[in-house]
Amino acid sequence: MVSLTKRSLLLAELEVTEGTDPVPTPALNSILISDLVVKVNGELLTRNFSRPSLSPLAHVIGLSDVDVTFKTELKGSGSADGGLAADVPEIDPLLQACGFAVTLNAGPAGDITYDPASDSLKTVTLYSYPDGLLHKIHACRGSVAFNADAGKFGELSWTFKGLYITPTDAPIPAGAVFNQEKPPPFLNANLTFDGYSPVVQSFAFDLANDIQRREDANSAEGVIGFVLGGRDTQGSFNPEAVLEATHTFWADWKSAKEKAFSATFGSVLGARIDITAPKVQAREMSYGDRNTVRTYDIPLTFAQNLGDDEVQLKFY
């Protein structure tokens, strides 16, 4: 058979016990994705010994693990006045496996909030079906980067590392169920920076988790799992350049002023997402050009306020 790149399916389910397969199903754990890449990493052990022959010896594969990358839309579940476990967004297991802790706030004006965490971190099992094969990837931890342009959908780029298991022949299973909610475009976003509402075209942030593998000679592939050892959350945005009398971009950069940041996607309950950050700092200041209008290109540092709170996602 011919394996088509367009035909694929990704399932994701949180693990109760790290590294133990929770057996995700198409009906409950399908994730709507694009640009799926599964990269198997095997340490090539060459045998470069002195012999009468100049020809190479056969190599051996040592430590093995897997990198998985893909993209998703930023959208909620569509449940208005949610806040229950049944109302979490489709990407919930991915967010938790990237070090976010979820808080369910049930009630008439309920919401589901994701904050970075430093303990009790979760792992996820991914099933990747690249049209004819099945890669089961356990003990996955990862990181996520977000980007939004005016008038476009918010896009999340995911990177995970997991344990290697030899893939098996398997057709893409039937019965995949995806959340039918449409993602809200980046419009009427009420984006503010220290209370100032700039004219801005794009906004991005990257959680930048440091994912390191735990090497173990007692494990089948020499790797027992992965740790989230730290994060360096950064971002960027590109407001139009203004006078300092309008907003003190340059003075605030020089003083490393910490500013509150917020932006909203959507306005309908069940499809609204707020992104907030309590202490954002400009890392650099440089000029850009957008359709003949002078802009600022500003890389951002997302700093903590009271603890694990440098950025928050709220779905409601």
Image (cartoon, rainbow, N blue to C red):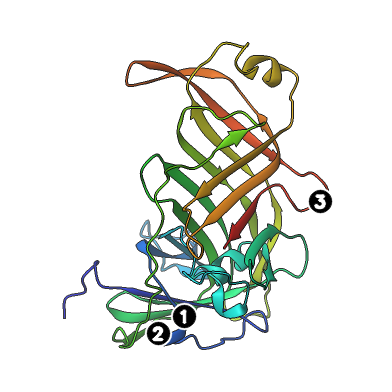
Foreground residue among 105 and 160: 105
Foreground residue among 213 and 101: 101
Give the residue drawn at x 37%, y 63%.
Answer: 182
What residue is shown with label 3?
307
SS category of the residue bearing label 3: loop
Residue 298 placed where, x, y %? 55, 27
Give me the disc on residue 186. Answer: none
Circles 1 and 3 in contact, beta carbons < 8 Å: no
Give the residue drawn at x 39%, y 50%.
Answer: 185
Position of 295 with respect to 34 (left or right) is right
Residue 275 placed where, x, y %? 59, 49
**Residue 19, can we see it?**
yes
Q: Earlier in the sequence, mark 3 or mark 2?
A: 2
What residue is shown with label 2?
26
**Residue 207, can we see it?**
no
Circles 2 and 1 in contact, beta carbons < 8 Å: yes
Foreground residue among 105 and 4: 105
What residue is shown with label 1?
29
Circle 1 packing at 10 Å, graded few (<14), some (14-19), many (20+), is: many
Residue 195 placed where, x, y %? 65, 31
Give the residue drawn at x 32%, y 81%.
Answer: 133
- How far, Cα to Cα, is label 3 from label 2? 37 Å
